[in-house]
Amino acid sequence: MNRMKMALGQNYPNPFNPATTIQYSVRERQWVTLTIFNHLGQYVNTLVQSYRNAGTYRTKWDGKKQNGMPAANGVYFCRLQSEKSTLIRKMTLLR
């Protein structure tokens, strides 16, 4: 993480079905949002939206959209965002 205020690891497993784990770290207390988008950049779901103390965290995505319906097969992007940084990782959902 060096000078970065946060880090976003690659999800595992990847590709995944039915769920995947996303690990991220923050070096200082800050507001973070972890959001899923499809390959077209359309919003799919928000997994985290809160303050986090310094540390490493894991969250699962169950492959569902915000409305609870299953997301389609395909490429998705996980975006970790704070006031000062944005990090993105590509994920693949195979049903």
Image: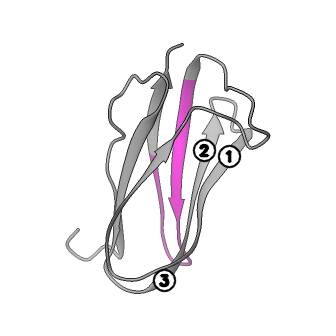
Residue type of the residue flagged with mark 1: Asn
Instruction: State which tag comes first along the sequence, 3 or 2.
Output: 3
**Magenta-drawn segment:** 75-88
Instruction: State which tag comes first along the sequence, 1 or 2.
Output: 2
**Which residue corresponds to mark 1?**
45
| 3D distance between C-alphas at marks 3 and 1 | 21 Å
Q: Is residue 76 above or below residue 83?
A: above
**Which residue corresponds to mark 2?**
36
| 3D distance between C-alphas at marks 1 and 2 | 5 Å
Does residue 85 belong to the magenta stretch?
Answer: yes
Judged by its main secondary structure, the magenta piece is strand
Q: Residue furthest left?
A: 2
Q: Residue 9, how many percent across, how many down?
A: 31, 50
Does residue 76 belong to the magenta stretch?
Answer: yes
Q: Secondary structure at mark 2?
A: strand
Q: Is residue 17 above or below residue 1?
A: above
Q: Are marks 3 and 2 in contact (CB under 8 Å)?
A: no
Q: Are marks 1 and 2 in contact (CB under 8 Å)?
A: yes
Q: Is residue 77 above or below residue 32?
A: above
Residue 68 is left or right of residue 31, and the answer is right
Residue type of the residue flagged with mark 3: Gln
**Which residue corresponds to mark 3?**
30
Q: Secondary structure at mark 1?
A: strand
